[in-house]
Amino acid sequence: MAVEKNKTPLANIPQQAQKAARAETAPAPMRRYRQYLFIIALGALAASFGVLTFFVKTIHSFPIDLVITVGIQSIHFVPFDNLLIAISWLGFWPQAGFISMLIVVVILFFGLQWEAMSAIIAALAASLLNVFIKDLIQRPRPANAIVHVMARLNDFSFPSGHVMFFVGFYGFIGFLVFSLLKPSLKRTLILIVIGLLVGLVGISRIYEGEHWASDVLGAYLLGTLTLIAIIGFYRWGKSRFFVHQPVAKPESSNT
């Protein structure tokens, strides 16, 4: 008789879970409204990048680029200067590859296989797409005769590879932190650090004279589109291949 009583609550668990999920889910009209807003925002990002790319390809230089570079390079505050230089340094090889792999190893340490694989894909996708667009547009980098250039790089300028990598890879890490960690001071601090890295890397590339502001803007636009695609890919694969991936070992039963 006791066994029968214990079966009843277990049988109701799926129904209770569905009821709780419905309570936490937005109504259908609200979900459709959010979906429309997302599609509009996505289209605006793609259109903005397309228009900017067209003008970069046909005009090559904009007066506003020089104004912005001169303005940023006129800032002389040693801690801020050193911070920008350090952030740019993080985006160069081999340190960028080493830090990325270290982060992937940490993710694997927690048993998150699909998250680690998606992070690797995020890094590769952002980098390879950047190289493809650069070779397609072939925009020259700023000349040392016009602005101060800290280091002369041999590849093309549009869009910024640093910015695309930071938005694609670190942006995806930020998404994982926000999605997988419970609200806490630790999560907040990690998100703040990631946000500062992603936000300041664009300024750092202009400050060092290795990119125009339009290079940075294009990279933020295309990097955001890349990040959205990576998150969509992650969610697609998560629901199919790694639904039951173990995060903690199940307790053994002796009964």
Image (cartoon, rainbow, N blue to C red):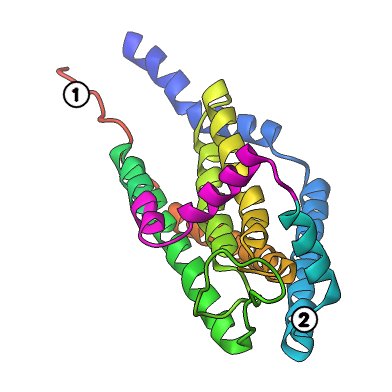
Residue 251 horizontal/vertical position (percent):
24, 23
Magenta segment includes 91: yes
Magenta stretch prevailing secondary structure: helix
Highlighted magenta segment, given as a residue range: 75-100
Above or below, comparing residue 142 to residue 227 in the picture: below
Secondary structure category for the residue under label 1: loop
Q: Quadrant of the C terminus?
A: top left
CB within 8 Å, label 2 to label 1: no
Q: Circle 1: is it few (<14), some (14-19), or many (20+) Cα within 10 Å?
A: few
Question: Could you tell whether 69 is left or right of 103 in the image?
Answer: right
Task: Please give the count of numbered marks on the rendered protein.
Answer: 2
Question: Could you tell whether 224 is left or right of 170 in the image?
Answer: right
Question: Could you tell whether 62 is left or right of 95 in the image?
Answer: right
- Which one is in front, 245 or 66? 66
Magenta segment includes 151: no
For residue 61, which numbered disc appears in the image?
2
- What residue do we see at 62% from left, 64% from top? 223
Residue 108 horizontal/vertical position (percent):
31, 44
- Residue 112 seen in the current view: no
Disc 1 residue type (three-letter):
Ser
- Which one is in front, 151 or 45? 151
- Residue 4 seen in the current view: yes
**Mark closest to the chain's N terminus, 2 or 1:** 2
Q: Quadrant of the N terminus?
A: top left
Secondary structure category for the residue under label 2: loop
For residue 252, which numbered disc appears in the image?
1
Question: Could you tell whether 44 is left or right of 12 in the image?
Answer: right
